[in-house]
Amino acid sequence: MTRDTTRRAVLASALAAGTAGLAASDAADLLDSFAPLSGDAWDAADRSLPEVVESPHGPAEVARDEFGVPRVSADDESAAYFAVGYCQAFDRLFAMDLQRRVMRGRLSAVIGEATLSSDEFNVAMGFAEAAEATWEVVAESRAGPLVEAFADGVNAAMGDLPLPLEFELIGYEPEPWTPVDSMLMEKQISWTLTGDFGELRRALVADRLGEERATALFPARYDHDDPILDGTETRLSESRAASTARSGTGIDRSTAGSAAGSVAPVDPELTDWLSGFESPTGVGSNSWVVAGDHTESGTPILAYDPHLSLQAPPLWYEQAVDTPERSVRGATFSGVPFVIAGANDRGAWSFTNLGADVLDCYRYEVGDAGDEYRYDGEWRSFEVDETRTIPVAGGADRDLRVRRTVHGPLIEREGRTVGVAWTGHTATRTTVAIEAYGRSEGIDDLLDATRDFDLPTQNLVYADADGRTLYFATGRLPVRRIDGEVVDGNRIFDGSAGEGEWEGFEPFGESSWDGFVPFEEKPHAIDPDVLSTANQRPIDDPTHYVGVSYATPYRGARIADRLDAAVDGEGVTDPAFHRGLQSDVRDGRAPELVPELVEAVRDRSGSDAPDSDRSLVAAADALDPWDYRMGRDSRAALLFARYLPAFRERVFGPAFADADLGEAYYPSDWTLARLPDDDPLFDGRSRGDLAVASLRDALAEIDEEGWETYGDYNTTRAMDHPVGGEAPFLNYGDLPADGSPATVKNYRVESAVGSSWRMAVRPGTDATAVLPGGNSGDYFSEHYDDQLRRWLANDQRPMPLGAGGEPAVRFRSSEEGSR
């Protein structure tokens, strides 16, 4: 039976059983939102690209390689991006429409009341208005006409082709795509990477546990020796001291102030509600570059794997575009015209999350009537105060009051309010920067383009065919002041007193960015020899405050150690080494926690141990010689993976429960491993006793589930389709996986986060890549999941540049077609 007929059989079974619909992962009551399947579902099974498509932008050709990656070629840029839009709509139209509905707060219009909370947040935040402000700026740039051509291509595909199956399952048709929708995708990406209400949680923890305990358990700076930069790197020619003196934005770290600040915490229910719309737990990435002096070919090598949500289809979409102006291939997000991370014929670039603080929260004195707020010594009306209606399928529409201050949105929940300022609320030029990256011819072009990269704040790593390498912290970094003194941003500010305002920031308009860190003063390195990023802090002694939301250094330290060992002396590397490093599964938490566990078990279990303890001894015997690698076939990896959350709960649970703080507030595993035996959290309990009890908890769970090895627990079951809850045939298969939250080969089964794209590039020569699933979002396509097993094994396939292959689609001029 062929793959296509197998899927037709599954769909036929779904038809017979009447199981068609949409289910959010956390809402089991969405069955009523499903439309009954009809004959239109069979139309979706027969979707295919036409051989000829008329284009108002001129001729182009699209070849598709063996993995369904479109390779677009044209003599005109607009013609090429019309074809790109057409191909993205063919492969990913439902994903595109779903994301813009989420960001516009229009999901309930097709789903119902189950998604109202999400819609209320997104409408209140004003993402759509921010996208409109951004389009006004981008429309006047070189990228503007290409974004318009892309939208034309999407809409042409909607008119030419049957809709994907999901639209029939839910029972609606998408509206036309607009350039603003592509800007909205930029906002969605930026929010995923920088939307962080951490200061609200820190203030609540400080209030509940006390400032001293909060600082001890949640340090603003992890004590380790593995930052991205060591301070010896070559910087841009302008000296740091001269520019800081001129700008007056230098910060005295000794007087920066406490994390909690002086403003009272926001209501815990509002804090928890807002925290639900932040980035998925553990979002991060790996990237590194090695200069040509340390490679067999003499050409730099860049390796990259971003850690984002894993789902069917993947977040990333691979494409190639070849025109007289560019030859670029790599990954983008559905709805974004340009390659975001990839390579052209001269260079390669990648991004990992910087962890910068680009969102501030404000408390205001609000008038009793709710139509005024106190600011700058006077009462003033809200800049925006109006009612928005959120359509609700199968229910009553919801009216939402939208209010905005000089800083940005005022978020309200059951009478509780907090003001928000986010750099993404203004017009941003990141689309302009990304478009320019694709045409860049060297490091100078990259630097020029990076000046326009407003958001998200990222660790840009670059290498080119000239042998140049680069690291730069992208994005706008706000400078905050209270009473004229520069302060850190990890606090709640008094908005009525004008604390922490960003000079030159215009929410929902075009900002001057005057009160932001100058470009030359952001962390960067010109021509680094060997450099890696894994979301750890960028530098030990920054001139300016960047943030506090940095990852624990486990991944960063492992990558740096292996790179240093490989290039030590006369050592050189090749692409195979870098792909092997991407597959590294050693968990740095294990050597910090496992030896003490083994010792505790053996101290408490002698030769006359009762039968109930023999399983503990057997587990300790399995853990003792373990190499700390989270491999799917490892019993010890399974024991550690289930021991750690049990130990975390036994150590943190009682005290945090007493403070009415759930596990989302627990400190990191880095903190857990370093707690002294006399820490108040133990409250007279022995650390060893808790360790043994936690291992017993883990063994009980393992026995109950019937797991034997790590791969029995750590599977791809978490990589669901957005509508896979009630249409499970859309989900990927359940396969064993390697890796953990702390390994280079990153996979987090609990949160469905991990390596969402991998590539290894020698600029100007060869490149390889792999996606976690397939390039097509069409369930009936052979490319729906054809890379899943390759991704699990990190078996990357070639990612060539330039036009090539027999054209699958020819785009001809509309004028030519009319003759």
Image (spheres, helix red, strand yellow):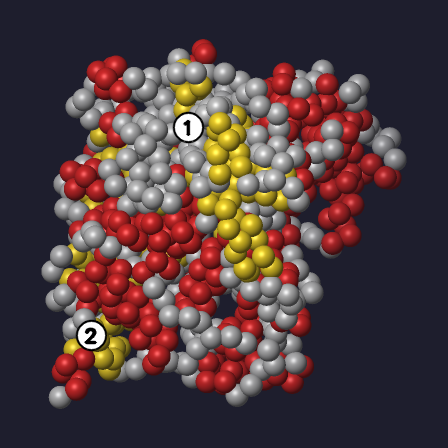
Examine the rendered structure and indicate whether residue 480 appears above or below residue 535: above
**77 relative to 606 in the view: left or right:** left
Rendered residue at 87%/30% (across/down): 608
Residue at which label 2 appears: 56
Rendered residue at 42%/63% (across/down): 96
**395 relative to 528 in the view: left or right:** right
Q: Residues within 10 Å of mark 2 (few under 14, many from 20)?
A: some
Residue 189 appears at what percent x and percent y? 41, 49
The one of 290 and 627 positioned closer to us in this rendering:
290
Residue 295 numbered mark, or none: none
Residue 501 numbered mark, or none: 1
Residue type marked 2: Pro
**451 relative to 195 in the view: left or right:** left
Residue 357 appears at what percent x and percent y? 44, 32
Rendered residue at 21%/37% (across/down): 447
Q: Secondary structure at mark 2?
A: loop
